[in-house]
Image (spheres, helix red, strand yellow):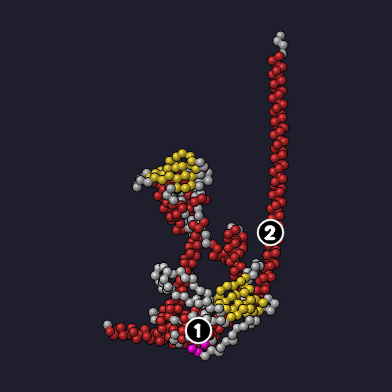
Amino acid sequence: MDESHNHFTKGSKQVETNVANESEDYLQNEKNHAGVISTPNKNIPSMKTPYEGMNFNSCEEAKEYYIEYGRQKGFSVRIRSANKTRARLDEVTSVYMVCSREGKKEKKDRIDGVDEIGRSCNTIKCGCKAKMRILLNEELNKWTVTIFSDDQNHKFVTPSKRIRLRSNRHMLDAAKDLTEAFNGENLQIGKVPAIFGGTNIGFDKRDCYNHLRKVRYEQALKKIVERETLEDYVLEHKDRIIDENNLILKHGAKVYTRNIFEKFREELVDSIRFKCEEGERSGDFNTYVVTAKVGYPEQFNLKMKPRIYEGYCECKYFEFIGLPCKYVLRTLNKLDVDEIPPHFILKKWMKGANSFRVMDELPVSDIYECSKAFRLSHLCRRSTQMSCVASKSDELYKMAIEGIERLFTHIMDEHNKMVECDETSQEISTLQKDIELKNCAKYLFKTHVYQKQRVGLRRIMEKEKSVAPVD
């Protein structure tokens, strides 16, 4: 027993050593491409203090510069606000950055340091005035510092504790890969930070566990998407074997997904043990009483509009589940309804409810023949994809903006033409209706006059007959 345990311990240590040794080459490559791991203890050349009028090539460059400046000095930076243009472009034109200790916490506790529940209350806010504002200079195509203040009213974080600053926390891709490898080999995750140099490296074992939790979440989402994709394939290309003579069941198999159809079929089968009797009419609705013939005694009242079959049952099954209940189905059977009324069909339970996921793979002809919501979702998706690519460089950005402006102008022209055609067609249809009404009025008037003349002529003839001399 002891020998096997020792053998297992030695084996696990050997695996751990091998994984650590194999990661050294990848770590060295990461250093060569991303620079040496930045720690507060290393000698890093001090950065130049920002000043008003200082220019940057991009907004991201300016933000990274100020964050790194605060990191070296010993304070954390946060973005307080960002302003955008009023035009359709929705482009950021200014960014306002402050120290994370800016502002003051409102006091809402009863006793100093204790809130209403009894928890200890701490805050890092102390009213620090350090700030930097950058503004887009369209003439120079640069980001310029317009406001800068280095007025700090608090102690700076020492190099040994700067790992606790939020802006200092950073986990290299090599560390993420090594964490996943350790987890796959059932090794201790907490040893990963030690392999990368100790405590002041930008992450600790808590970050490693957070990364694993994020990976598991992404894997779970991927499995859900794969399962739903398989379900969509089955729905689109496989049909259920059902009784062709049961028309309402056949219609349910046509509109509902597989899982929802099973619940619908259960309700339909259970509805056989009920009987339905018609009650008194109440306004626009007809009332019905559904009673159980066998089994547990049940009785529910429901009301339903004739012809459109919009119904409401006391059991509230449709309101909670979104499917017609057994009592509604029994009433529809009594009324000889062969299809599920639209009132009882929710779009979220229908086949193809999540078809927007594969809209980019559909033929163009299929995309055009769809609902307004589908078209809007597709346009937003494609526009977002284009924006992500076009924002990577100034040339792509300008090309996208010019194309959007031309396309928008063309679309507005076509839209205005369609509106004018609709208004013209409405005017023509209104004129035709007026002509038809006038012709109808003339016809009725002539008919009325003709009938009136006939009545008068008949009366004259009857009068003449009554006064004629008798031989």
- Is residue 197 placed above or below 272 in the rendered structure? below
Quarter of the image for residue 77 reads bottom right
Q: In the image, residue 450 lies at what x, y percent?
A: 71, 29
Q: Is residue 250 above or below residue 445?
A: below
C-alpha separation, residue under disc 1 versus residue under disc 2: 60 Å
Residue 309, position in %: x, y?
50, 46
Front position in the image: 138 or 325: 138
Query: What secondary structure characterizes most of the magenta part?
Result: loop
Q: Quadrant of the C terminus?
A: top right
Type of amino acid at the residue the image marks with label 2: His
Q: Which residue is mark 2?
A: 415
Closest to the observer, 317 or 167: 167
Q: Where, by quadrant of the figure, is residue 241 drawn? A: bottom left
For the question of whether residue 55 can be seen, the reply is: no
Q: Is residue 26 above or below residue 79?
A: below
- Asked whether, in this view, residue 443 is left or right of residue 334, the answer is right
Crowding near pointer 2: few (<14 within 10 Å), some, many (20+)? few
Type of amino acid under label 1? Phe
Residue 61 at what x, y percent from top left? 60, 80
Observer-side mark, 1 or 2, equals 1
Residue positioned 50% across, 43% down in the render: 285
Tell me if residue 4 can be seen.
yes
- What's the mark number on residue 156? 1
Quadrant in which the N terminus is drawn: bottom left
Q: Which sits earlier in the primary sequence, circle 1 or circle 2?
A: 1
Magenta residues (range) = 36-42
Residue at the limit of the structure toward the top, as seen here: 471
Q: Which mark is residue 75?
A: none
Q: Determine whether the residue tagged by mark 2 lies in a helix, strand or loop.
A: helix
Is residue 387 magenta-colored? no
Q: Give the structural element (helix, strand or loop) at label 1.
A: loop
Residue at point 72%, 42% (across, down): 435
